[in-house]
Image: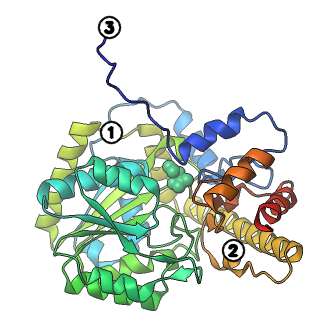
Amino acid sequence: LFMFSHVEPYAGDPILGLMDKHKQDPRADKVNLGVGVYFDNDGKLPVLNCVQKAEAQIANPPKPRPYLPMDGLPGYRAACQNLLFGKDAQVLKDKRVATTATIGGSGALKVGADFIHAWFPQAKCYVSDPTWANHIGIFEGSGFAVGKYPYYDAATNGIKFDELIAFLNTLQAHDVVLLHPCCHNPTGVDLTQAQWDKVLEVVKAKNLLAFMDIAYQGFGEDMDADVYAIRKAVDMGLLFFVSNSFSKNLSLYGERVGGLSVVCKDEAQAKAVQGQLQFNIRRIYSSPPSHGGHVVDIVMNDEALFNEWVQEVYVMRDRIKDMRQKLRDSLEAKLPGRSFEYITKQNGMFSYTGLTPEQVARIIKDFGIYMVANGRISVAGLNASNIDYVANAMAEVLKD
Ligand code: LMR
């Protein structure tokens, strides 16, 4: 009877919890700018054409569903590698990269964090201040002490770059530094290429373990520019981790399609790491789901479907950019003398609005506009029908 009486209630997730609250809100003009999910101009979650074509191939004729290998389909793993490192990259020809499919980007972080904690038990983990809340949750869940490195500068809507470099220089060898190669979550503020070069120099000099988490490839500048930091790290001879996700860029959120790659010194090392990743996966969930795995494999390894996919990602990217511009223009018109340039300078799905937790609480209560308490909005939730309503509400809470 008293078995579970000591179990404490869960406060809920700061991001995923917003989906339920938005769903339960009866107001017709409610808006969901919470979770990082791309909606089209009609407010609908798209099913990409390339995905529909791949699914038609899978369905016809119906295919059996055996267990996939622990680390996923070979074509899936190759797809992750080609996108991240470049199809003709020497590091791939040298077979120096261990790659596994994972249950979304979160699964990649978990498998990677467990691996690092097992083999580098002294290492601490450092995340940007601020970061995606689940980075902290996942690494703490794997047994890490998690600290923060200086990043966002609210005064300039930019980066505390000198402080960041000075901080990295204080870390110990093998400490994990979690980096966002593009479309920083939650701020949308990315390092320039020159800044990346400097950060990676410190990572190399101090022998830190970089863990690059990329969930938005293609939503920043383009497929190649968005992985600048990853390819630069390879060129510099670094050995490091990359977690990637197809949730957003294939609009396959619920299929849980992610990947984890580890750049190793040579093929023998990569084989050992690959085996240990399989061992970890077997102990957590055995093997990845098959439907999404096959969709990714088909789209990424067929030239026509791949090209169609890239264009579909750019349509999503450009619509978000258009919404940024419209939101900025509208706020500047409503609040003369104030600059909202930061909205158009930020990259990817998110804008860090600077709204305080109190202002966020008010915009949710008075207007039914859902956003994360730290002031992050998902710009991809804006569309032609709700943008005026959102701009009015933001101007209203910002004006006092
Ligand atoms: C987000 O930051 O909103 C997305 O990455 C979705 C999530 O799992 O939180």
The foreground one among 146 and 86 is 146
Residue at figure coordinates x 17%, y 75% from the top left: 172
Disc on the earlier residue, 3 or 1:
3
Q: Is residue 169 visible?
A: yes
The coloring applied to the image is: rainbow
Spatial CA distance of label 2 from label 3 is 54 Å
The residue carrying mark 2 is 343
- Name the quadrant containing residue 158: bottom right
Disc on the earlier residue, 2 or 3:
3
Spatial CA distance of label 3 from label 1 is 41 Å
| Nearer the camera: disc 2 or disc 1 | 2
> Is 205 situated left or right of 49 in this image?
left
The amino acid on which the numbered mark 1 sits, given as a three-letter code, is Leu
Residue at figure coordinates x 40%, y 50% from the top left: 106
The residue carrying mark 1 is 68
The amino acid on which the numbered mark 2 sits, given as a three-letter code, is Ile
The foreground one among 58 and 82 is 82
Disc on the earlier residue, 2 or 1:
1
Residue 141: x and y in percent read: 29, 47
Judged from the image, the secondary structure of the residue bearing numbered disc 1 is: loop
- Name the quadrant containing residue 109: bottom left
The residue carrying mark 3 is 1
